[in-house]
Structures are given as C-alpha cells and as structure tokens.
Amino acid sequence: MPQPSNDKNQVKNYQNILFEVADGVARLTLNRPDKLNSFTGTMHFELRDALDSIQSDKSIRVLVITGAGRAFCAGQDLADPDMAMGTTAPDIGNVVEQNYKPLILRLQNLRVPTVAMVHGVAAGAGASLALACDLVIAGKSASFLQAFSKIGLIPDTGGTWFLPQRVGMARAMGLALLADKLPAEKAFDWGLIWQVTEDAELVTTVNKLAAQLAGMPTKALVRTRAAMHAAPNHTLEQQLTMEGGFMRELGWSPDFAEGVAAFMEKRAPRFTGE
Ligand code: T3D
C-alpha cells in the first residue's frame, strides 16, 4: 500500500500529509497511518495549502488522493482538540463550515480531474472525501463506511448529496442509517465507485489512469464534471444552455484546436491543458 516517500519530487514539507508532483500528476497522501489518516485541524490546513498549489501550478494535470498505511481515511479524528468535550460541547457545525465544506467545494471546482485511490477503510468524512473525487478506484479489500450514525451524527462532507445520487435513496438510506461497511466490490456493483482492482494491482492501475488523465484536455474534463454536477438541479433547457456555454469556451481552447488537428493528421494529440 502507499507508503510515505521522501524522494526528490516532494514539493512541500507537511506534518499530516505528503504532497508530491511528478510528470503532471500531483499525489496527495493523507499521512497519519497510526490513526488511520483521520482528519485533524493541521491536516485541513495542509490540504488547503496543497490545493492552493494545484490551482496555481499549471504543470499539474491530475490529482490523486490516497492514504498512508492500511487505510484510506477514518474521517474526523475524534480525539482532535476540535472535538474536545470541555465544559461545553464543541460546535462541530463550525468545524464542518470551516474545514469540510470548503474542502469538498474546492475539490469539486479544482482545475484538474481528481482520483481517489482507496485501500482499506474509507470511513465517515474519509468516505465522503473519496466520493468527492471524480473517479474512485478501490482495491478489493477496501470498504466504505458511513460511520456517522454510530456516534450520533449525519453523513456530512457531502455524504447526503453523493450517496443518493450514486446508489439511489433506498441504498443510501440503508448505508447511512445502519453504518454497515460496504465492501469495494459491492460499492462497484452499486455504482458508487468507478473501478475495483486486485489489491496488488491498485497502485499500478491508478498510476496508469493518472498518466492517461494527465495527457488529456484538462479543461474539457473539468467542464464535464461541472456540467454533470449541475444537471440534477437544471431543467433540460438550462442544461443545454450550460453545455452550449462550455462548448463555446472550449471551442476557443488550444486543446480543441490540437484535438481536431491531430484527428485530421491521423496522429496522437499533444494536449497542454490549455
Ligand atoms: O468535527 C466533526 O466531527 C465534524 C466532522 C465529522 C466528520 C466525521 O468524519 S465523523 C466520523 C468520524 N469517524 C468515525 O467515527 C470512524 C471511527 N473509526 C472506526 O470506526 C474504526 O477505527 C474503523 C472502522 C475506521 C477501523 O477499524 P479498525 O478496527 O480497522 O481500526 P481501529 O483499531 O479502530 O483503529 C486503529 C487506530 O486508529 C486506533 O488507535 P490506537 O488505539 O491504535 O491508538 C483508533 O483509535 C484510531 N482511529 C481510527 N479512527 C479514528 C481513530 N482515531 C481518531 N479518530 C478516528 N476517527
């Protein structure tokens, strides 16, 4: 499974995450393996900083998110000071507003496509983080756990939005209320995630996918994401109008010109992400 690395590609020195960029691929590893990569305030701060880097570094064409050690992410660190039960109960609504909500919105609006590489358990906000990525690839032994009801909370971090859209209300409700672990293969069968691999093939599969995405017309990919997510709240006419706007914008892009030129010249396109 992914392990912390200190190779020459690491671009920032963080405490709770690793962030590396190589060949157009940004790899963000949640890095608290002893605590199953659960979220702390520090981790959120560092995630914001890493996402800032992605927004400003045009050489980055895809983001892969994963976890170090045996899990993807166990959600909020229940021992973090944010959660500390003092004389009064913490206002975890503030934690959601200040940390989780911006994280998900930033991922949904990120200038590059996103891939979650899931091994082991993705629980609570960790499951929602994976589902907020454009493509979720899981090893066979991975699982998704809506852990929230076990501690008296609701699926946050977009869980109540992603789940019913992907698996339908009946399954979403069962997962959320009962908090049973959903094995990766069933998550795939239910349409929650894009792909399941043998555990031993997960990293290779995701590396290949990331290289593929890094060579694609980035703007078209993220406008596709935006259109797909807008659709449930649009009439057909509104959606057609949105599609027209994106097509107009993309029609003036260098990558569209390159794609058409490559087709006409019967060669592979060399997209730049512009
Ligand atoms: O501020 C807010 O709360 C708002 C936002 C909330 C969003 C949320 O994510 S709420 C949901 C929080 N997450 C959970 O409730 C999941 C809690 N964890 C578990 O249920 C289990 O750990 C797992 C099912 C994920 C994995 O079980 P297992 O048996 O494989 O591992 P384990 O032994 O339980 O955990 C290993 C270690 O990680 C252990 O530490 P230790 O005893 O070896 O020192 C355990 O305490 C720690 N750990 C796992 N999850 C968390 C955690 N520590 C802190 N927070 C966690 N969420």
Image (cartoon, grey):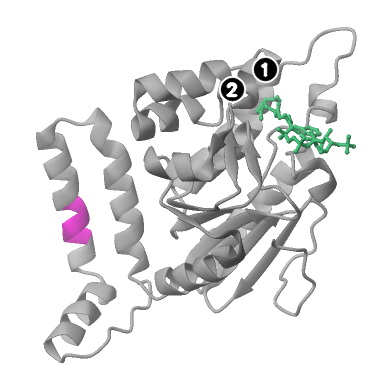
Question: Looking at the picture, which amino acid does disc 1 mark?
Answer: Lys
Looking at the picture, how far across and down is residue 150, in whole percent?
67, 17
Q: Image point 63% across, 55% down: which residue?
A: 66
Q: Which quadrant does the C terminus fall into?
A: bottom left
Q: Is residue 21 magenta?
A: no
Q: Image point 38% across, 27% down: which residue?
A: 164
Quadrant of residue 40 within the rendered picture: top right
Q: What segment is highlighted magenta in the picture?
A: 245-249
> Quarter of the picture for ligand 1?
top right
Looking at the picture, how far across and down is residue 206, in whole percent?
52, 65
What residue is shown with label 1?
A: 150
Q: Nearer the viewer, residue 42 or 27?
A: 27
Quadrant of residue 17 within the rendered picture: bottom right
Looking at the picture, how far across and down is residue 211, in whole percent?
47, 74
Left or right of 50? Residue 59 is left
What residue is shown with label 2?
A: 179
Looking at the picture, how far across and down is residue 37, in whole percent?
75, 45
